[in-house]
Amino acid sequence: MIEWLKMGGHGYFIWSSYAMLTLVVIIELVALKRHRQRAHNRVLEAIDEDSE
């Protein structure tokens, strides 16, 4: 198992690349969620302004 994790001496680079990819995907998902929420709020505000 340890040899598989070391991946022929390249394990550090491979696993750190996977970790960075995971981090970037999480950051992107959070940013998309925030952007969607802001857009939703703007639509609700526009609807409220039109109904007045």
Image (cartoon, helix red, strand yellow):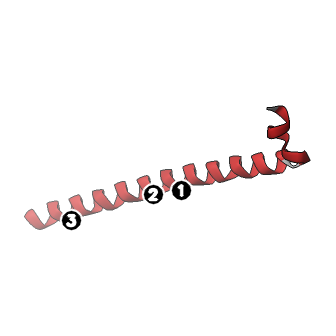
Q: Are marks 1 and 3 in contact (CB under 8 Å)?
A: no
Instruction: First in sequence, mark 3 or 2: give its number.
Output: 2
Q: Nearer the viewer, mark 1 or mark 3?
A: 1
Residue 7: percent from the left, percent from the top?
84, 45
Q: Are marks 3 and 2 in contact (CB under 8 Å)?
A: no
Residue 25: percent from the left, percent from the top?
57, 53
The residue that mark 1 highlights is: 28
Residue at 85% in and 41% down: 6
- Which SS class for mark 1? helix
- Which SS class for mark 2? helix
Q: Amino acid at mark 1?
A: Glu
Quadrant (top left, top right, bottom left, bottom right) of the N terminus: top right
Residue 29: percent from the left, percent from the top?
49, 53
Q: Height in image: 30 above or below 50?
A: above
Q: Are marks 1 and 2 in contact (CB under 8 Å)?
A: yes
The residue that mark 3 highlights is: 46
Nearer-the-camera pick, 9 or 32: 9
Which numbered disc covers residue 51? Answer: none
Residue at 91% in and 46% down: 9
Q: Height in image: 3 above or below 24?
A: above
Q: Amino acid at mark 3?
A: Ala
- Neighbour tally class for label 2: few under 14, some 14-19, many 20 plus, Cα within 10 Å: few
Nearer-the-camera pick, 8 or 15: 8
Separation of marks 3 and 2 at Cα, in angstroms: 21 Å
Quadrant (top left, top right, bottom left, bottom right) of the C terminus: bottom left
Instruction: First in sequence, mark 1 or 3: give its number.
Output: 1
- Neighbour tally class for label 3: few under 14, some 14-19, many 20 plus, Cα within 10 Å: few
Residue 37: percent from the left, percent from the top?
35, 54
Say whether residue 20 is left or right of residue 9.
Answer: left
The residue that mark 2 highlights is: 32
Q: Is residue 52 visible?
A: no
Say whether residue 26 is left or right of residue 15.
Answer: left
